[in-house]
Amino acid sequence: MTSTSARETRIVADPDVPLVRITREFDAPPEKVFRAHTDPELVARWQGPHGMETRMEHYDCRTGGSYRYVHTRDGEEHAFHGSFHDVRPAQLIVQTFTYDGMPDDVALERLVLEELPGGRTRLTATSLVDSFEGRDAFLASGMETGVREGYERLDALLAH
């Protein structure tokens, strides 16, 4: 079992560029963490905050693929879409990310999986937007809660 601090989701706004960096460790090997990020059925089970359901409209996680999904709760809907630019099994996913509610704010995201001793994985994700205002709006949107709670849900999924 990992200490609480190692499993903490760290979300940091870079002071020099409009970028958010997320780091998190998981008690599973990179292959399993990668599959949970690329298999649409698995992604739908963990992504987003507690109490939200994810409806996949399409999710083709491969270099050149694209996605669109909708988070729903009590009639409320939040849709997201983007393109996968580079997908390398158990290592890397580079994609764009757009929230339909803010269509002019497109993030370039890079997710890196690093193998740790004991069959564990460190995930480092960066989201770069075109302005500090866009980055701050991204953070103010509740993204932090969704990321933290989603990774808690991912822990449970990876435990099986």
Image (cartoon, helix red, strand yellow):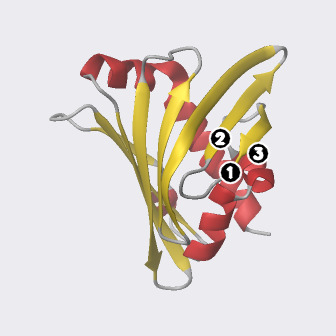
Left or right, 130 with respect to 48, comes to: left
Residue 34 vs 115, above or below: the answer is above
Q: Position of residue 54 (x, y in %)?
A: 77, 36
What amino acid is at disc 1? Asp
Pick out the residue farthest to the left: 16
Camera-near label (2 vs 3) is: 2
Residue 54 vs 37, above or below: the answer is above
Upstream in sequence: badge 2 or badge 3: 3
Dot 2 falls on a residue whose secondary structure is strand
Q: CA distance from mark 1 to mark 2?
A: 6 Å
Quarter holding the N terminus is bottom right
Upstream in sequence: badge 3 or badge 1: 3
Q: Which mark is residue 60?
A: 1
Q: Which residue is mark 2?
A: 67
Upstream in sequence: badge 1 or badge 2: 1
Q: Residues within 10 Å of mark 1 (few under 14, many from 20)?
A: some
- At 54% from the left and 42% from the top, the residue drawn is 83
Q: Position of residue 100 (x, y in %)?
A: 59, 19
Q: Which mark is residue 44?
A: 3
Dot 3 falls on a residue whose secondary structure is helix
- At 30% from the left and 16% from the top, the residue drawn is 133
Residue 85 vs 137, above or below: the answer is below
